Image (spheres, rainbow, N blue to C red):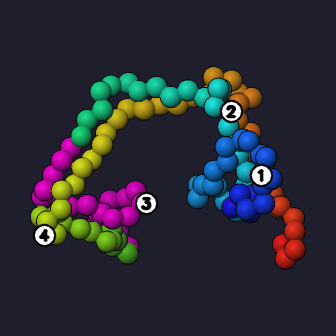
Amino acid sequence: MHFLLRKPSDFKIPTFCSGALADGQVACLGLDAFMIAGGSVPRFEISKTATVVMDDAAGPISAVGTPNTVAAPISSAYQQNLVLIRFVADIDWQLRNASGFAWTENVTWGGAGE
């Protein structure tokens, strides 16, 4: 995020932040070295009665163990008068050229208070 605040106004390369990178990590991807392919026709599943776990972390709704775990928060489409839509697609990506991706860690942008 610090770079977005401090980048020069004439910096023409598209720049994005990602929560997938840890603090101090910077990654660069050459879009001409990257390809995406879809294998089959995507499908949509629509439900007015399904239950959904409203959490970004993947996991079972409940699991027996020590301790027992239950995913939360859980919402019922029926009880809350919702329509749930699930999009399923087989998508793959690959670098066409290994030099099209680079990253570095322990980056500090410098400046007062850092």
Q: Position of residue 49 (x, y in %)?
A: 12, 58
The relative height of residue 19 versus residue 114 in the rendered view (above or below) is above
Say few, some or many: other residues with alpha carbon within 10 Å of mark 2 (under 14 / 14 to 19 / 20 or more).
few
Q: Residue at x 18, y 62 (%)?
A: 82
Give the amino acid at mark 4: Gln
Q: Earlier in the sequence, mark 2 or mark 4?
A: 2
- In the image as oriented, which residue stretches furthest toward the front? 9
Give the amino acid at mark 3: Ala
Q: Is residue 51 left or right of residue 114?
A: left
* Real-space CA distance between mark 2 and mark 4, rounded to the nearest whole angstrom: 46 Å
The quarter of the displayed image where residue 28 is located? top right
User: What mark, if any, has residue 79 been given in the picture?
Assistant: 4
The relative height of residue 17 versus residue 73 in the rendered view (above or below) is above
- Which residue is nearer to you in this view: 9 or 64? 9
Of helix, strand and loop, which mostly describes the magenta segment?
loop
Q: Earlier in the sequence, mark 3 or mark 4?
A: 3
Q: Position of residue 102 (x, y in %)?
A: 74, 39
What segment is highlighted magenta in the picture? 45-66
- Which residue is nearer to you in this view: 2 or 64? 2
In the picture, which quadrant includes the C terminus? bottom right
Give the amino acid at mark 2: Gly
In the picture of the structure, the residue carrying the numbered disc 3 is 57
* Real-space CA distance between mark 1 and mark 2, rounded to the nearest whole angstrom: 21 Å
User: What mark, if any, has residue 30 been given in the picture?
Assistant: 2
In the picture of the structure, the residue carrying the numbered disc 1 is 9
Of tags 3 and 2, the one toward the viewer is 2
Q: Position of residue 16 (x, y in %)?
A: 63, 50
Q: Residue at x 18, y 66 (%)?
A: 76
* Real-space CA distance between mark 3 and mark 4, rounded to the nearest whole angstrom: 23 Å
Name the element at disc 4: helix
Q: Earlier in the sequence, mark 1 or mark 3?
A: 1
